[in-house]
Amino acid sequence: MSNKPLNKSLNQYSLWKYWVLIVTLVILFFSALPSWYGEDAAVQLITKKPNTLSSEQVYQVLNNAGIKSKRIEQQQQNVLVVFAQAEQQNLAKNILSKSFSDTAQVTLALYPAAPNWLLDMGFAPIKLGLDLRGGVQFLLDVDLGLVFQNQAVMVSDSVKQFVREEHINGVRVRQGIGAEVHIETSQQAHKGQIRQFLSQQYPLWQVSGQQDTLSVVLSDDEQLKLTNLTVQQNLQIMRSRIEELGITEALVQRQGENRIRIELPGVQDPATAKNVIGATASLAFYPVAETGSVNALVLKDELNKPVYVSRRPVLSGEHIVDARAAVGDFGMSKVNISLDATGGKLMSEFSRDNIGKPMATAYSEYSRNDKGQAQQVTKIISVATIQSQLGSKFEITGAGSHQEAQQLALLLRAGSMTAPVTIVEERTIGPSLGAENIANGFAALALGMAVTLLFMACWYRRLGWVANVALVANMVMLFGLLALIPGAVLTLPGIAGLVLTVGMAVDTNVLIFERIKDKLAEGRSFASAIDVGFDSAFSTIIDANFTTMITAVVLFSIGNGPIQGFALTLGLGLLTSMFTGIFASRAIINLVYGRDTRRAIKV
């Protein structure tokens, strides 16, 4: 019986599959293309007021200083200066900072060197990690002991105030280690009163009795929640502070339970980074004065509008123990604030006498300028009307959306400075070392690809060129995905993952081609061997790549920095190698050899 009717149904793809393949390759090719051009060193001038700076002014200052720029662009109210030589970047930043200190903030930047038509399509180069670009890395330790201690102080002060108001004698309150308070009394009735007070006011604290002593300890769940909130607070603070450095690819992430790792690619001055990261912040509550008052203090809010407040605050942020965002009545956002005993008394007395009047919350941040001088920036972050007498616990409404309320809570907690950070590790990588890492890494990648392409072409001859086309397409897709995925960063271990992907990509084709050879040895036609070979190798390929993908996911989940960079390229490489090895290779083979009915041919 003739095999022709059967061959018509073999090795055929629907038209839509070819379109999916072509569109995917084209999009990822254009996504990978900007990385080929690289990036140029640049500085960005962010104007403080509209229409106060022009590109002509910037050009004149640089020209007078003998600094040549590649181009100067006016971007709405900001000005971007791109340099052909990276050595000119820091020199230009210092000169422009001095010339436009009153009108603009000058920050370092890296601008894609790709043509504008490519950038206008929304594509950008791959973001490089610290080990490839050079820069500064800090490892910060968050002091959680002080956080728990402040919580214990709040409970201790509240119990002392309670026993005074209830005229309970013979009670001794002392702090333990961390979030622990010990209350000593020999009267069982007094112990019952104190237990009831603690259960009502501090339900998250666990009370246990040992003879004449009550031990009050913050629950483990609340300690974990407080730890996460504290580290989150510091992460938010650090992210906002490093914006002053103008590093858009800065990495700020949690490491372990109570540490924060900060990577600042492109920054070569650790002292400048320390001044920004090590800045301190404070908070204060002010009575709002009448507009135009002579003796009032004028502060700007977030919309840059003046707010008149009294010169003397009601209380400062040192009395804030906790601040958390929550959802109030009718789904409106609010922020719950907890004060210590002294702060609660001050707030109670002030709010009692000022019901119906507004109160402003001012956030101040201290940092050091280029001369090492301390400077303070204060702004009003909230103005609320006092509805009733407040105590050690009260809430602020009108904070906007829930996200804005969370941001306000973080600022309030930041003002209390309950979680100081210490730099425990500092590392600087020079730009020359980063460039050397890039050169060596991609040289290894090029050598690995060249040897693999040569081997596949010589060993599989007829099908080897298909594997080589699929391998090149695989690398294009992988670079395109790295540039397209938000937050993806290429590191030196990531390049190692790329080299590993080269071998894994052809491994898929090797499995398929060996199956095809086996089927040809059984006497099948070339077309039939292709069809059965792809089908029989499919499950093996999926199993092998799935187990490796599990490893990549685990590495990315529990690892950090370089380990995550390796896991990212490994995981993406698995996806692209399966796509090109199974889908793209099959599409090419179907078109070229899909109807070849010859038998006993060598592949």
Image (tube, helix red, strand yellow):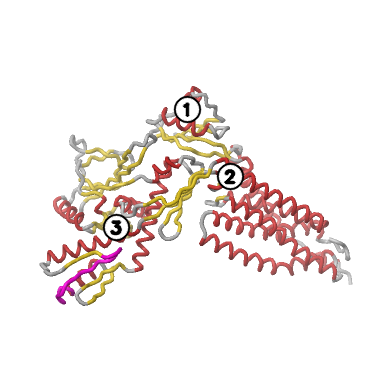
Amino acid type, residue under disc 3 in the picture:
Asp
Tell me where residue 240 appears, x and y as whole percent: 40, 46
Amino acid type, residue under disc 2 in the picture:
Pro
Q: Which residue is mark 3?
A: 322
Tell me where residue 418 appears, x and y as whole percent: 31, 54
Which mark sits nearer the N-terminus, 3 or 1?
1
Amino acid type, residue under disc 1 in the picture:
Val
Tell me where residue 333 appears, x and y as whole percent: 32, 56
Q: Range of the magenta residues?
A: 176-191
Q: Which residue is mark 1?
A: 58
Q: Which residue is mark 2?
A: 125
Q: Is residue 153 magenta?
A: no
Q: How far apart are the two marked residues, 3 and 2, measured between alpha carbons?
A: 42 Å
Q: Which quadrant: the C terminus? A: bottom right
Q: Mark 1, residues whose alpha carbon is within 10 Å: few (<14), some, or many (≥20)?
A: some
Q: Is residue 182 magenta?
A: yes
Q: Mark 3, residues whose alpha carbon is within 10 Å: few (<14), some, or many (≥20)?
A: many
